[in-house]
Amino acid sequence: MKNLKQNIGNPNITKTHFGIYGIVRRNAKILLIKKARGPYKGMFDLPGGSQEVGETFEQTLVREFAEETGCQVVSMLNKRQKTIIFGDFTQESGEQGVLQHSAVLFDVQIEGEPDIEGDGRDSGGCVWVDVNDLTSKNATPFALIGADKPLIALSDENDNVITTHIRKTPLPKGRYIMVSAILMFNARGNLILQKIALHKDWGGLWTYSAAGHVDAGESYEQAAVRELKEEMGIDAQMEKEVAVVPIFRDGRLMARHHIFVTHSDAPIVPDPYEVTEVREISPQDLKKEIAANPKAFFEPFVRAFEAFCG
């Protein structure tokens, strides 16, 4: 079984990049540039770019906005850093590449009218784009983040993080959903189960203590920690990864569930949007319940439980 990982990398990365970018929103529209070169060539992207020697993040942003948009930055707020994997670009050799792209993002206000011509190098011109018109095919991951699109990570056939994708849209060929799931035990050795909220997929079934998609910029382990906090109100680190459960639909691999184990006796505060009921049960009693009424349980959870508890 794999050791726990904190990175989100792919061992086949062919290019790395770090940049500073600004998000400018006006109601339902976002200011983007059309990339004229590089891995994102032809796609909508956030204005911004690489630091020059001696620059602060803020100085880089001001300079890049002047160069690419012709506008002056008058305020920048809400600084945060993200790292994503983008594996859908073609290198100069003609082969597919894998880009690990780290960015510092700012929410920005500007003065002046954006330059529709561009700088002739990175930018092919500025445009205000309706966020509803942005997709994984026409916009970079950071442009989608700026547009508040719910981005998940997808893996390749070897379970390496390979790209980002807008949640609940058709999967690209050869890309697979990444899910982190948690089996949380208490001091009595009992497993904590949740019943999935009725309005959600597989609503009404008993399942993992918590589970969910790996978001863009996360590892499986990081997603597990976040999901446990969001769904059950529990702050806990994962102790070990115990199983990987492949999920098939119509004979095709669709997703992989990475199963983590942790222990906690902290008070549980379930999210009512996600969870309708919580209970604890001993592994021995759970085996009996599954045998008597398997349809009451989420099938991938049953496989994960059996893989761990035998």
Image (cartoon, helix red, strand yellow):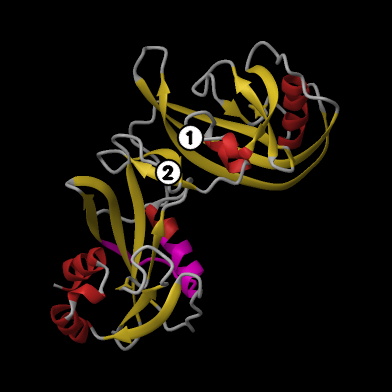
The amino acid pointed to by label 2 is Thr
Q: Residue furthest bottom?
A: 188
Q: Give above or below for 179 relative to 122.
A: below
User: Could you tell me which secondary element the residue under label 1 belongs to?
Assistant: loop
* Residues at marks 1 and 2 touching, judged by CB atoms closer than 8 Å: yes
Q: Is residue 41 left or right of residue 281?
A: right
**Vertical order, 204 against 97 (above or below):** below
For residue 286: magenta? Answer: no
x%, y% of residue 203? 37, 69
Which residue lies at the image location 24% right of the left edge and 56% below the top edge? 244
Residue 307 to residue 130: above or below: below
Residue 177 on image: x %, y %: 34, 48
Viewport quadrant of the N terminus = bottom left
Look at the numbered disc 2 and give the secondary structure of its residue. Answer: loop
> Magenta stretch containing residue 227, yes or no?
yes
Q: Give the residue at mark 1.
A: 136
Closest to the observer: 268 or 57?
Answer: 268
Where residue 254 appears, as percent x and y from the top left, is 27, 47
- Residue pictured at 29% horizontal, 44% vertical: 159
Q: Which marked residue is nearer to the observer: mark 1 or mark 2?
A: 2
Residue 84 visible in image: yes
Q: Amino acid at mark 1?
A: Ser
Residue, x 45% and y 40% (percent of image)? 164
Q: Residue 103: x percent and y percent?
A: 59, 37
Residue identifier under label 2: 169
Tell me the magenta residue range. 224-242
Residue at 30 percent of width and 57 percent of height: 258
